Each structure stands twice: as structure tokens, then as C-alpha cells.
């Protein structure tokens, strides 16, 4: 299928499917921001939408493609205004079950099933039905898994296979499915003509055989002429008015259902009153009852014995020589349908195969002479028109169980395709299987064996055999089967060109691209012409029994690859493989695949080889043809060549969203002995490897490679040992660089090879950044964030990584909580799924929280989010948390104030003493003036103190000021109402200054709330952008701690660093406040591309 819509993102070589969940380009809505609640994430608004705006698009989502219904609308729409797109409304019953029923039940049931039962016997017929129905049931299970692994636009099996196994397999199998559907059209047209000329108007035949031996050729020529005319008429109907085909579908379906009901009604009637359809037997041979009225040799009319019409068939005249067998045997009549209570079932249990020309005989009746029946094949006996054997009957019968893809082909019209396709398809197969099995038993229990083996009903005056059993009249079945075959033929001629058009539009088979074009409304005109031409080949074959095995091959090939696709996806366990249908297993898919392959060779080994050769040629044609075949020597040479070839292939284009998996670059910290400081980071890496992606573990040593070579090798050896201990499979990469920042930058840019490059960076949160005297530790952390963003790579930061579980731990019942604030590619959704594939996290449930603003409809957001997760095939609890635009609290101002003071002090550490003294003095004067306005008494005392100690160091002034403020921030709410903040006068030294500063960093200030009015002057000088960001961090932290403090793991969007590097230390403080009070946290920052999709 053609990739619809979708904008091309940087680093991505393939277009994306258009969806409201991905590639959001509605900047007016998606990126709008107003208020203070989400200020911490305002850096993200330029590129990533808020979740609330993303979910709003769900209500208008439709997965409809331009199919026949759209073509109808285009034909009927005369106005310049475009019609509003209607959401799909078809349910399981009308959208899947009945279409599958109509496609499965058809021409073989009405024209050949009685003959198969008579020839193979009840037991072997049940084996044929069981084999074929088991094959389709296993295929339906695999198809259900694929079809529920995302949204399947129109295209059916071709779309599913090509998106599961790649364009080569998809193109090969898609064309096989197209050829199968086209030859199915031939089969239905031949069935229509056979019913018309044999049972409705036999006199309409153009070619009439003058001799008995010419009857077969005459029949085939009639089939060719009438079949060609019928094909031309149907092609014109499809070309001119496809809407009539769709509207008549229910009429054709009603014909099928009425015919089935008539069969069962006739079976019930045979218990009480069997129908009168006598079969005339000469000896034990069955006679064609077409040219005589009475089953008698001689008849008495007016007391005169006269010869009958039957006599004239075997004797040239009353006194002339008669056929020897005719003279030696008596003529008897047997009831063709003795009924359910007759016990005829025992005679029909066993097979009665025979060669071409074998007479249909009843061995229970006496027979004299006739030692060489080949001499009598041109007499009016019922004979075998083909050589019969078990495998032939399998090939003829198999098309009667095809049609299981009808539901998936209509997925664009379904209200809930992921629910309807599995239920409807499997129920339809179960229903038709029951119908076929009961029909086999009931036909064998009601109808005489010789009549069952009479393919065209010649022994019952040319009546359709199954029609003789039906009630109230044989014409119910004749007319019903005629219209059923007409409808099925029209459906095939409607569906096959659209399938070819879809393949052509994908552009994977260049010479077919012309067939992607059509009329202005999209009708596949050229594809219809090619389909009609191929269909004519089947009609020129002219034999239903010869065409059926051909289309059996193509359908079996298609079903084989559906099973293969499901098995491969299950065994590979790709991150995108999350079918909503859970009742599948790779062993069932392999069994179905093996059964399809076996049935191909059972039906016809030479047809199977030809079909596989066609598929192989198409595969090789589509496949990249420029690959060199240098096999080298031995297995290692083969492995090296395969690896090189695979890497070159991978580099051709970026992976599709469905194939995206985390390829990790793990940045480890080493201690002074070059041992791994955080081995649990490797444990987390192992637990994330359900994605089956690449892992590179990297580290940077500062220095030059000439002096650090030995240490680098030691570090590499230690890392490999740690990887082995933690069962982390991957590669180790130690870089020696002049400084840490450059080394990490080199790793991010150059790690990996060709197409096997990392797309995600995993690192630990620098937990000791506040205590570190070297600011380069946290500056390198922020620069790493910027580097990964520039490289369009995702970033995972694990906080408190040492508390993460080891690979031997088994977490009990608990939750993995996802806080989804902005949509940056879906990484937040994918990671919990991957973790839950590992036994450590398997028992954990997934919860997803998203934030609603004041103008959001939280109830609708929850519904939309549940629908989004349903399309993603993810099981999770959903909760929408409302964050109101509250006034910024005093606690937030205090946090911001302390943060800015600390930031200012850090800057002072880098100034000269004179500059530092001047700067601190100005800060002190400014702050004291604001406090003087608030509390004159306290300020006077402070001034007196300064006058009595004029030589006091300016650092002590600063320390006293910080102490005053922090003491005030710890006052209780009751003290705040009627007393001044407590003042503690101390004699400060430089050592006490640092001690007090460290204490202030760690203390918890959340127990008090400031008086907004009294502190207002002091806050006026604060940077309002910092205040808003701090407000977001505080509010988000309150909400997250309230909901997720007991969770086993919390995943949270990581806000982007400021564009201005001057605010880096503030950014670290914001993150620290955001994560305060949480144990295990994984901060997630997307790489700017989609990593999860609703599509199959």
C-alpha cells in the first residue's frame, strides 16, 4: 500500500503513515502554550505538542483509504465542495462475518461437493475438509495476530505481509494473491456458465456434439464462448458501475444463505418423505436419463408389447442385434435419494476412485457379462470424465475454503477492526467448517452412491444433484448458486484490480507502475484490463476442475507467508509486535505454514513448483540486485560477508517506525580504580533488551592516548567483566580524550558502524552534583543532553540508579507509572512495554498519567487516551490529572530565591577578590534595603551591629543574610502571622559559612508557606521565567509524588535544557525539585522521530 501523507523527518528515509498520533503538524493547536503550569516544558513547545492537544485529534481519526466506496462518492459528487468523511461504522457481523461467509461458501459447494463425497467416500471427504479447514483456521489465527498488530488500511494480506516481511516477500505474495483472486474470477465465471448451460437452458449451447466422443469438446467450446462473453459483460459492469456491485452484494449473499437453508430443509424432509428422483440402472451400471421416459426395455400399451426409447438406445431396431450387456442384464430403478433413515451411509463410507472413462456402477446389484467396459463408454452410461484420486480432490476442494481475507480487506470500513477481524473471521471459518462437515455426512447419509458420483446429474434428467436434495424445489439451489457465482465473479473482478493497483502504487515492481493509474476518481482502469486478460486465460482452460488447483496454489502460497510472517514476528519479538489478539503461538503458525506447503504438493506438485518459481522470480526481481556474492572460505568468511552485506543494506535508509528499537549507547562512570561505579545501569540495559537492539557501553578517560593506553585497556576489561556479570550482550568502547565533554561528544557522534548505530543514550543522574566542588561534572551532563538532542537521539537518565533491581530480582505486584506531558515520539509508551517483557518487571502493571490544563476536557482526554492505547495494543490504566492555574506559592518564590543566590555565589567563586567583594556588597545592600522596608526594627539592629564591627568580612555579611532568610523560611505558619522572623546572631567564619551553606542545600523547606504580602518586595527582583519554571517543577513534583510515590518505576518527560547556557545551574535545580521524593525515576527525552506506531 502507498504510505499516505506524512512529513519526512530528518534522519528518516521513509515516509510515515498519516495519523493523528504521530507527525503532528498542527502548530497552532499543538504547540500553543499559555499559563505557568507547564513553563518548565516551554522549550519543548517549538517541536513537540502537548499531550492534551495531541489527544484532541483522536476524535476525528479515520483509517479509510480510497476504495470502492470513495469511488462511488466521487462519481456521485457533482458539487465543488468536498464531502465530509464518514467514520467507519460496520461491525463484526456485517463487516467481517457475512462477507467471509459469502466468499467462502460458493461454487464448489453447489457443483462439486456431492461428487467429492461420492468419489472419496465420507471418511476421506472428512479428511479433505478437515485438512483444508485446519489450514485456513491456523492461517486465520496468524492473520488475526498480524491484523490486530496495528491499524491495517485496505490492502489485506498484501499490506500485512509486505509490512511484516518486507517489500520482497510482500510483492511476491501480493502478486500471487492477485493471481489467485483473478483465477478465482475465472472459476466463478466457469461455474456460472456450467450452471447456465447444464441446468437452466441446456438448449442454449452453440456447439452440439454429433457423436458421443465429441461431447467433452463441445462442452469446453461452449464454456469458452459463453465464458468470454460473461467476462466481458462483468468487466463492463465493474468499469462503469462498481457501486452496483457493492449494492448487490447483500442480494448475492441472501442467495447463498437461502440455498444453504434449502439444503438442510431438504435433508430434514427426507426423514419423513424422501423426494422421488429414481435412477435407472442396467445391471449395476448407471444410465443417463436424458433420452428416454421409462426405465423399461419393453412396455405394454393396449395389450401390445412394444419397445421403449431405452431399447432404441442399445438396439438399432426391434429385430436387430442389441448390445450384449443390455440383453444379458435387467433394468431396475433405485431411489436416488432414499433419505436419512435408509442406512445408505454405510455404503458411502469408502472411496471409489477410478480412471478416465470408468463406468459409475453399484456393486450391490447383479451384473452379467461386461468384462470389458471400455467398449461401452460411448453408450448412454454415466462415466468418469477425469481420472480421480485423493490429491486431485484436495486441489479441487480447497478453493471452497478460501475467502478468509474478506474481513481484513475491508478493515478501512470497520468500526473496530482489531476486534472485528479476529472474531468475525474465526467465527466465519468455524461456521463454514461446520456446514461443510455436516454436508459431507448428510450427503453420504441421504443420497445413493451412484447419484453422488454423477457429477452433472445425468441420471436424474440433468438436475443438479444437490438440488434434488433441497426443499421446496431444485430450482432454489440452481438459481441461488447461479447468482452466487455471478456475485463472486463480480467481487473478484472488483477486488483483484484494486490489489494490483495497491502493489503498483507502492512502486516495488517498476514495470507494474502503469497499472497504478486509472480514471480521475481512482478507478483502476488499466489494472482491470490486465485482470480481464489473465482471467480470460482461465476461461480458455474451460474446465472448472483444471482451474481450481491453479488458484489453490496461489492462495496456499499467500496463506503460507501469512503464517510465516506471524511466526517470524513472534520469534524475533520486535518492539512493534504487540498484537491485541493473544491466542496465537509461533508453533501454530509453523504448523499452518507446514500444512500449506504440504497441501501445495498434495494438490499438484508441478503446479506447486511453478507457483513457487513465480514467487521466487518476483522476489529476486524486487530484491536489491547490486549485492556482491563473495563467499570467502569457511563459515567465518560467510559470517563476515553476511555482516558486511547486512550493514550496507541497513545504511540505505533509516528504519521505519515499526522497526525502530532502542539501540543503546550506555555512558558508564568509573571509579579511581577503573571499576564500574553503577553496575545497576548495566542491569537496566539488559532489562531493556527485549527490543533486540544494539548495545554499546562507553566510557571516557581524560588524558592522551599515548599515556593512558594501559588504563584504557584495563577500563575496557573491567567493563566487559561487568557486562558479563550483568548478562549484557553488546560492545565496549573506551575513548581517551583531553576532556570529558569532548570525549562524550565523540562517542555520541561516532559510536557504532554503518547502519548499526545507536539511537538512544542511557546514563545515570549525577546525584552528587550539589556536593561537587567541580562544576564541570554537571556541566558535562547538560552538554550531553544538548549533544543527544543535536544528534536526534533519544536520552534516558536513571535517577537513583543504584536502587534499580538486578537481573536476579523479581518485582512483585506493582506499577510502572508513565507521566506523559509532551509527545516527543512515543518513547514513554515503548519503554514500559520493553521492560515488562523481562522477568524482573513482568508482574508490574502499566499506568499512564497525563496532565489536563484548565481549558482541557479531562473526561474526553481520558477516552481519547484509552483509544490511543487501544490502537497501540498496550494494556494500561489511564488517569488524567488536572492541574489548575493556581497562584504561585511562597514556597516556590523561596526556592527560586535560594536557587538564584546559590547561582550568584557560584559565579562569585570565579571572580577576583576585589570584584567579588564589590559584587557581594551590592547584593547585600540591595537585599538589606528590601528587608528594611519590610522590618525597620530588625534592620536598625543590623546596622548597629555593622557599625560596631566596621572591619567585618563581606563574606560574613553574605552568610548572615542567607542565614536570616533561611531561618525565616523555616518559621511556622502560626509564628508568621504575628511575629517577626526569628534572628540568630552568630560570629561567622569562612568554615562556618560553607557548613551553613551545605546545610541549607539539604534542608526541607516544604513545611512552611510564606506570607505573599510581606515578602513581595523581596521577590520583585527575581527572574520571572525562573519563577514560572520552578512553579512547574514544584507543582509537577507534588502531583507525581502524590500519585506515584509507591510505584516501582516512574517514567517522566525530561524538560529540555535552556538555550542560554547561563541558566544551566538553574536547570539542574529545576530537575532536582521535579524529582524530589521519588525513588526510581527514568527521565526520557525523545530523539525527534516516532518510535511507536498504531499501524501494522
Image: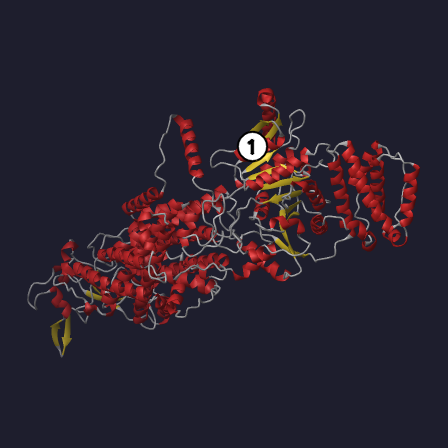
In the image shown, does 763 or 122 lie closer to the viewer? Answer: 763
Quadrant hosting residue 777: top right
Can the viewer see residue 492 in this picture? yes
State the residue lying farthest toward the left: 320
- Please tell me in which quadrant of the rendered image residue 308 appears: bottom left
Residue 330 image point, x, y percent: 18, 64
Q: Is residue 350 visible?
A: no
The secondary element bearing badge 1 is classed as helix
The residue that appears at 31% across and 64% down in the rendered structure is 239
Colour scheme shown: secondary structure
Work out whether residue 422 or residue 469 is closer to the camera in this orientation and state it.
422
Answer few, some or many: residues within 10 Å of disc 1's Cα (few below 14, many 20 plus, some between 14 and 19).
Answer: some
Residue located at (28% from left, 71% from top): 276
Residues 625 and 543: in front is 625
Question: Residue 510: x and y, percent?
Answer: 33, 48
Looking at this rendering, what residue extends furthest in the bottom direction?
302
Write down the quadrant of residue 1056 in the picture: top right
Residue 207 lies, with reference to residue 977, above or below; the image says below
Horizontal side of 746 relative to 388 (left or right) equals right
Please provide percent x and percent y for residue 235.
Answer: 28, 63
- Residue 431 lies left or right of residue 713; in this view the side is left
Look at mark 1 in the image and give the residue it sits on.
746
**Total marks drawn?**
1
**Residue 66 in the image, given as x and y percentages of width and height:** 41, 60
Left or right of residue 949, residue 594 in this image:
left
Amino acid at each position: 500500500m502507498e504510505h499516505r501523507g506524512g512529513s519526512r523527518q530528518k534522519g528518516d528515509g521513509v515516509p510515515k503513515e498519516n495519523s493523528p498520533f504521530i507527525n503532528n503538524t498542527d502548530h497552532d493547536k499543538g504547540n500553543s502554550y499559555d499559563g505557568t503550569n507547564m513553563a518548565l516544558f516551554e522549550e519543548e513547545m517549538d517541536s513537540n505538542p502537548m499531550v492534551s492537544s495531541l489527544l484532541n485529534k483522536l476524535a476525528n481519526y479515520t483509517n479509510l483509504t480510497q476504495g470502492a466506496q470513495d469511488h462511488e462518492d466521487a462519481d456521485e459528487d457533482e458539487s465543488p465542495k468536498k464531502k465530509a468523511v464518514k467514520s467507519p461504522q460496520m461491525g463484526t457481523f456485517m463487516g467481517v462475518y457475512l462477507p467471509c461467509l459469502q466468499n467462502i461458501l460458493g461454487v464448489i459447494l453447489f457443483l462439486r461437493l456431492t461428487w467429492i463425497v461420492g468419489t472419496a467416500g465420507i471418511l476421506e471427504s472428512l479428511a479433505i475438509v478437515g485438512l483444508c479447514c485446519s489450514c485456513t483456521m491456523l492461517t486465520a489465527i496468524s492473520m488475526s495476530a498480524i491484523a490486530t498488530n496495528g491499524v491495517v488500511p485496505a490492502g489485506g494480506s498484501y499490506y500485512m505481509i509486505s509490512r511484516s516481511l518486507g517489500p520482497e516477500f510482500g510483492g511476491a505474495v501480493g502478486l500471487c494473491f492477485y493471481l489467485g483472486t483473478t483465477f478465482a474470477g475465472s472459476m466463478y465465471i466457469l461455474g456460472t456458465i456450467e450452471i447456465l448451460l447444464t441446468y437452466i437452458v441446456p438448449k442454449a449451447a452453440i456447439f452440439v456434439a454429433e457423436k458421443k466422443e465429441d461431447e467433452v469438446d463441445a462442452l469446453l467450446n461452449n464454456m469458452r464462448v459463453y465464458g468470454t462473453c460473461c467476462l466481458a459483460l462483468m468487466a463492463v459492469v465493474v468499469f462503469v458501475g462498481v457501486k452496483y456491485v457493492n449494492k448487490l452484494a447483500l442480494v448475492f449473499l441472501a442467495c447463498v444463505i437461502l440455498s444453504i437453508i434449502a439444503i438442510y430443509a431438504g435433508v430434514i424432509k427426507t426423514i419423513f418423505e424422501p423426494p422421488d428422483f429414481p435412477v435407472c440402472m442396467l445391471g449395476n451400471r448407471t444410465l443417463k436419463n436424458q433420452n428416454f421416459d421409462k426405465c423399461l426395455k419393453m412396455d405394454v400399451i393396449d395389450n401390445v408389447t412394444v419397445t421403449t426409447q431405452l431399447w432404441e438406445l442399445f438396439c438399432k431396431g426391434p429385430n436387430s442385434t442389441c448390445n450384449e450387456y443390455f440383453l444379458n442384464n435387467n433394468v431396475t430403478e433405485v431411489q436416488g435419494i432414499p433419505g436419512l433413515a435408509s442406512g445408505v451411509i454405510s455404503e458411502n463410507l469408502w472411496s471409489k476412485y477410478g480412471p478416465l472413462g470408468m463406468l459409475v456402477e453399484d456393486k450391490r446389484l447383479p451384473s452379467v457379462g461386461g468384462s470389458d467396459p471400455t467398449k461401452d463408454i460411448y453408450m448412454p452410461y454415466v462415466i468418469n470424465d477425469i481420472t480421480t484420486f485423493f490429491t486431485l480432490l484436495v486441489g479441487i476442494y480447497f478453493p471452497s475454503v478460501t475467502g478468509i481475507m474478506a474481513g481484513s480487506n475491508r478493515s478501512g470500513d470497520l468500526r473496530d477492526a482489531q476486534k472485528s477481524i479476529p472474531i468475525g473471521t474465526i467465527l466465519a471459518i468455524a461456521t463454514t467448517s461446520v456446514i461443510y462437515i455436516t454436508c459431507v455426512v448428510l450427503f453420504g447419509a441421504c443420497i445413493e452412491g451412484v447419484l453422488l458420483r454423477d457429477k452433472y446429474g445425468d441420471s436424474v434428467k440433468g438436475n443438479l444433484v444437490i438440488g434434488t436434495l433441497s426443499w421446496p424445489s431444485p430450482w432454489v439451489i440452481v438459481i441461488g448458486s447461479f447468482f452466487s457465482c455471478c456475485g463472486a465473479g463480480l467481487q473478484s473482478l472488483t477486488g483483484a484490480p484494486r490489489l494490483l493497483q495497491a502493489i503498483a502504487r507502492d512502486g516495488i515492481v517498476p514495470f507494474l507502475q502503469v497499472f497504478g493509474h486509472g480514471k480521475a476518481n481512482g478507478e483502476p482502469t488499466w489494472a482491470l484490463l490486465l485482470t480481464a486478460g489473465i482471467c480470460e486465460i482461465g476461461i480458455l482452460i474451460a474446465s472448472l476442475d483444471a482451474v481450481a488447483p491453479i488458484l489453490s496454489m496461489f492462495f496456499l502460497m499467500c496463506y503460507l507467508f501469512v503464517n510465516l510472517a506471524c511466526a517470524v514476528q513472534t520469534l524475533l519479538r520486535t518492539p512493534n509486535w504487540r498484537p491485541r489478539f493473544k491466542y496465537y503461538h509461533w508453533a501454530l503458525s509453523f504448523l499452518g505454514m507446514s500444512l500449506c506447503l504440504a497441501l501445495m504438493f498434495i494438490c499438484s506438485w508441478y503446479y506447486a513448483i511453478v507457483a513457487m518459481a513465480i514467487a521466487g522470480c518476483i522476489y529476486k526481481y524486487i530484491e536489491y540486485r547490486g549485492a556482491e556474492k563473495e563467499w570467502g572460505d569457511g563459515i567465518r568468511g560467510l559470517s563476515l560477508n553476511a555482516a558486511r552485506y547486512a550493514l550496507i543494506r541497513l545504511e540505505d535508509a533509516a528504519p521505519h517506525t515499526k522497526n525502530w528499537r532502542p539501540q543503546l549507547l550506555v555512558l558508564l562512570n568509573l571509579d579511581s580504580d577503573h571499576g564500574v561505579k553503577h553496575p545497576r545501569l548495566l542491569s537496566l540495559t539488559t532489562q531493556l533488551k527485549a527490543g533486540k537492539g544494539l548495545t554499546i557501553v562507553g566510557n571516557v578517560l581524560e588524558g592522551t592516548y599515548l599515556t593512558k593506553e594501559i588504563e584504557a585497556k584495563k577500563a575496557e576489561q573491567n567493563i566487559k567483566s561487568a557486562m558479563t556479570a550483568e548478562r549484557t550482550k553488546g560492545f565496549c568502547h573506551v575513548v581517551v580524550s583531553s576532556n570529558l565533554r569532548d570525549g562524550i561528544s565523540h562517542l555520541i557522534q561516532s559510536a557504532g558502524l554503518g547502519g548499526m548505530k545507536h539511537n538512544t543514550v542511557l546514563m545515570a543522574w549525577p546525584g552528587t552534583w550539589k556536593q561537587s566542588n567541580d562544576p564541570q561534572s554537571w556541566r558535562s551532563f547538560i552538554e550531553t543532553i544538548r549533544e543527544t538532542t543535536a544528534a536526534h537521539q533519544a536520552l534516558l537518565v536513571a535517577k537513583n540508579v543504584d536502587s534499580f533491581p538486578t537481573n536476579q530480582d523479581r518485582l512483585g505486584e506493582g506499577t510502572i507509572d508513565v507521566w506523559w506531558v509532551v509527545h516527543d515520539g512515543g518513547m514513554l509508551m515503548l519503554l514500559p512495554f520493553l521492560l515488562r517483557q523481562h522477568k524482573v518487571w513482568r508482574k508490574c502493571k502499566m499506568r499512564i498519567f497525563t496532565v489536563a490544563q484548565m481549558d482541557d476536557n479531562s473526561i474526553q482526554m481520558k477516552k481519547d487516551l484509552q483509544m490511543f492505547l487501544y490502537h497501540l495494543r498496550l494494556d494500561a490504566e489511564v488517569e488524567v490529572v488536572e492541574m489548575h492555574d493556581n497562584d504561585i506559592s511562597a514556597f516556590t518564590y523561596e526556592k527560586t530565591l535560594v536557587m538564584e543566590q546559590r547561582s550568584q555565589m557560584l559565579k562569585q567563586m570565579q571572580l577576583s577578590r576585589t570584584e567579588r567583594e564589590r559584587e557581594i556588597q551590592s547584593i547585600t545592600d540591595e537585599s538589606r534595603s528590601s528587608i528594611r522596608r519590610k522590618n525597620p526594627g530588625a534592620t536598625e539592629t543590623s546596622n548597629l551591629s555593622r557599625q560596631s564591627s566596621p572591619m567585618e568580612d563581606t563574606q560574613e555579611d553574605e552568610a548572615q543574610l542567607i542565614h536570616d532568610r533561611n531561618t525565616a523560611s523555616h518559621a511556622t505558619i502560626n509564628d508568621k502571622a504575628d511575629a517577626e522572623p526569628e534572628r540568630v546572631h552568630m560570629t561567622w567564619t569562612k568554615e562556618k559559612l560553607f557548613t551553613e551553606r551545605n546545610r541549607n542545600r539539604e534542608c526541607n523547606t516544604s513545611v512552611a508557606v510564606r506570607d505573599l504580602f510581606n515578602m513581595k518586595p523581596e521577590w520583585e527582583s527575581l527572574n520571572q521565567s525562573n519563577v514560572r519554571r520552578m512553579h512547574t517543577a514544584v507543582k509537577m513534583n507534588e502531583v507525581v509524588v502524590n500519585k506515584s510515590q509507591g510505584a516501582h518505576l516512574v517514567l517522566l518527560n525530561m524538560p529540555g535544557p535552556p538555550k542560554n547556557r547561563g541558566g544551566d545551574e538553574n536547570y539542574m535545580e529545576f530537575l532536582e525539585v521535579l524529582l524530589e521524593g521519588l525513588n526510581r525515576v527514568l527521565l526520557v527525552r525523545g530523539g525527534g522521530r516516532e518510535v511507536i506506531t498504531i499501524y501494522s
